[in-house]
Image (cartoon, rainbow, N blue to C red):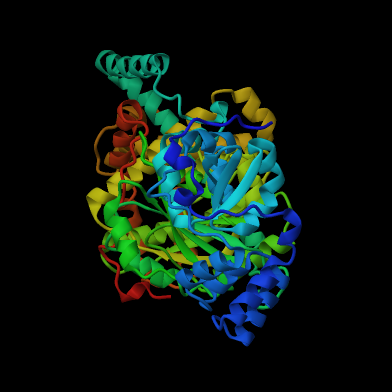
């Protein structure tokens, strides 16, 4: 279908103002990389041995010659752009003087423009000028462009300028697209309707009235539920531990540097108000030893976040790292930013890091090696998380022990049991096809990772834990810790509510084992945090005080409750001690005894989470980084 000519000012219709453009026949594009390389060699821009290296890498791994030259530092971007312009006989599109026509953008689609690196720029009579940083992309899409626009010609621009123009012209559309990638039935974006708020408020009013009218009965009910969920959580942890001990993790062999199986890996890092840590992040990611032409690092930053954008400009980014700017919108969440940047990734494997991360240098190689041999239904590899400041204070030590148990014992055991794995927010790697099949991340869920883990399981995909570690900064200040944990718990509450909208459908998709595992994990976690004071109330009995529940129980039942308490405490301490032996961090066994006083902090977080679930469900209470970011962070 051809596009009818669009009315434009007479001055804009002249080729002189648009700059030279060139109509390129598809056949003339054959061997364009080799001819470009010869042109660079003839001009003395690149040495013969460097060109041979780049062409060899392209023959082995594919990709664009220009990207390989840049990623290997064999040529500067400005010089390469000049040579590409001369080679093709085209000049830069002057987007500052002549902005693009948004109606032309809509014909191709805003997301497609960013994905394909094509910007329908201006109409000159019946000729549509397409600006692109990659002439190869123009050649590849030329038949489709002709079908949409009629006669087309190519002009040159930079990737940064194309993105800036797209943000200016169609930022709102791009934001809306990032918000709605997940189907409505599996998203929480419609949370907070009148019906939901009515039932939540009615439930709260009922509990208050119950407490005033029959407080002892309420204590009985809450105590019973707390004990039931404690028993369920303990049973799940025991099963996960046994599964982990029966089938310990095995490290994947590393592929050699020249292996033909190496895929292109794109890693996204969502940044927001990270002016103090951006430079150090670039240094840490530079330690990754994956081939540079196959490593695509996207530093994803909000359009309004001038602090981080300025810090990244000062950081002297290598050519294999690039900044992706997210258009401003009604919410600013990490999953929304990731959804926006996903379309601009080059890799077949998509990774996610956090701003303060320090991954092990060989991590990407391990991921590529495991994906090459594992079941195709294994769509996600979750790495281990640890901390580089465990000795800062008591809170950092407790956080380190908690993470050691969670990532070294519990999550691997959950995966080996074949249950849905609630993902961590970083050191995640996905098969791109599976991620796009699910609609990527729910932009409104503040624990998008746990939600995505559930959706992977619902659609028949598997998650594995992989033996590689990323070090982070432990959140070891009480108030920020409570804020961070409240966001996690709010997301757990939201995730549970979303996936339980249709329990029968969820049961049919997961099967009984995964369905019960989901209940034991999410419902027990939420309940245990919120009912911590109820469980702690039983500690008054050894002190000789009266407890309304204990007073009414027969002695054998009370002894059973005491046994569950002791088993839970012993299990927590034993698992912690074992898990700490699996991490690089070491600390005395006595610190494990203090975990008993660490988890009650989560009760405060759970009440904050419940309040926000009603009043501010999509608010992202961001954790600031870099407060304890020292030389210990070096891997």
* Vertical comparison of 33 with 244: above or below: below
Position of 194 with respect to 150 (left or right) is left
Please say whether residue 240 is visible from this viewpoint: no
Please say whether residue 455 is visible from this viewpoint: yes
Screen quadrant of the C terminus: bottom left
Residue at 63% across / 86% down in the picture?
A: 48
Position of 95 with respect to 52 (left or right) is left
Q: Nearer the viewer, residue 452 or 285?
A: 285
Screen quadrant of the N terminus: top right
The percent coordinates of residue 249 (x first, y second) are 63, 64
The percent coordinates of residue 454 (x first, y second) are 57, 40
Q: Nearer the viewer, residue 360 or 246?
A: 360
Residue at 63% across / 80% down in the picture?
A: 51
Write down the quadrant of residue 254 in the picture.
Answer: bottom right
Position of 368 with respect to 385 (left or right) is right
* Vertical comparison of 261 with 475: above or below: below
The percent coordinates of residue 95 (x first, y second) are 42, 49
The percent coordinates of residue 421 (x first, y second) are 57, 47
């Amino acid at each position: 279908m051809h596009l009818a000519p669009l009315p434009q000012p007479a001055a804009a219709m002249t080729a002189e103002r648009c700059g030279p453009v060139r109509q390129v026949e598809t056949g003339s594009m054959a061997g364009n990389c080799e001819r470009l390389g010869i042109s660079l060699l003839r001009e003395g821009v690149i040495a013969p041995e460097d060109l041979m290296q780049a062409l060899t890498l392209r023959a082995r791994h594919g990709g664009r010659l220009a990207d390989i030259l840049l990623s290997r530092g064999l040529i500067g971007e400005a010089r390469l752009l000049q040579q590409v312009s001369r080679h093709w006989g085209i000049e830069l599109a002057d987007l500052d003087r002549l902005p693009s026509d948004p109606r032309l953008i809509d014909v191709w689609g805003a997301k497609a423009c960013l994905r394909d690196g094509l910007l329908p720029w201006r109409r000159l009579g019946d000729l549509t000028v397409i600006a692109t940083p990659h002439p190869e992309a123009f050649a590849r899409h030329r038949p489709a462009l002709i079908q949409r626009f009629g006669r087309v010609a190519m002009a040159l621009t930079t990737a940064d300028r194309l993105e800036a123009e797209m943000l200016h012209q169609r930022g709102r559309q791009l934001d809306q697209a990032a918000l709605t990638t997940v189907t409505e039935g599996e998203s929480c974006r419609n949370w907070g309707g009148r019906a939901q708020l009515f039932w939540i408020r009615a439930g709260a009013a009922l509990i208050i009235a119950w407490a005033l009218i029959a407080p002892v009965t309420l204590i009985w009910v809450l105590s019973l539920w707390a004990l039931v969920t404690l028993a369920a959580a303990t049973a799940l942890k025991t099963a996960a531990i046994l599964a982990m001990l029966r089938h310990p993790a095995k490290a994947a062999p590393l592929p050699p540097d020249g292996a033909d199986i190496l895929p292109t890996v794109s890693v996204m890092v969502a940044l927001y108000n990270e002016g103090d840590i951006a430079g150090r992040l670039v240094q840490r990611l530079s330690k990754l030893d994956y081939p540079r032409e196959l490593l695509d690092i996207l530093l994803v930053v909000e359009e309004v976040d001038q602090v981080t954008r300025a810090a990244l400009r000062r950081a002297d980014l290598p050519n294999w790292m690039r900044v992706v700017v997210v258009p401003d919108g009604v919410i600013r969440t990490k999953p929304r930013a990731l959804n926006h940047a996903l379309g601009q990734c080059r890799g077949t494997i998509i990774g996610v890091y956090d701003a303060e991360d320090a991954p092990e240098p060989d991590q990407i190689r391990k991921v590529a090696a495991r994906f090459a041999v594992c079941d195709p239904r294994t769509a996600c590899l979750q790495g281990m998380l640890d901390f580089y400041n465990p000795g800062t204070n008591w809170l950092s030590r407790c956080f380190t022990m908690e993470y050691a148990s969670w990532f070294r014992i519990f999550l691997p055991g959950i995966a080996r049991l074949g249950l849905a794995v609630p993902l961590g927010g970083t050191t995640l790697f996905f098969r791109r096809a599976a991620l796009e099949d699910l609609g990527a991340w729910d932009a409104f869920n503040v624990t998008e990772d746990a939600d995505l883990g559930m959706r992977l399981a619902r659609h028949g995909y598997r998650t594995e834990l992989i033996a590689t570690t990323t070090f982070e900064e432990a959140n070891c200040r009480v108030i920020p810790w409570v804020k961070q944990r409240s966001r996690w718990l709010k997301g757990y509450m939201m995730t549970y509510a979303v996936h339980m909208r249709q329990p029968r459908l969820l049961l049919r998709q997961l099967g009984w084992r995964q369905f019960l595992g989901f209940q034991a994990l999410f419902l027990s976690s939420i309940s245990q945090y919120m009912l911590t004071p109820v469980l702690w109330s039983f500690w008054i009995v050894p002190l000789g005080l009266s407890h309304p529940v204990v007073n009414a129980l027969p002695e054998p039942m009370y002894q059973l409750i005491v046994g569950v308490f002791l088993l839970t405490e012993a299990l927590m301490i034993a698992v912690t001690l074992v898990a700490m032996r699996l991490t690089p961090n070491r600390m005395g066994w006595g610190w494990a005894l203090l975990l008993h006083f660490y988890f009650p902090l989560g009760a405060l977080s759970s009440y904050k989470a419940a309040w926000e679930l009603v009043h501010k469900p999509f608010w992202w209470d961001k954790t600031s980084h870099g407060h304890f970011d020292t030389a210990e962070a070096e891997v």
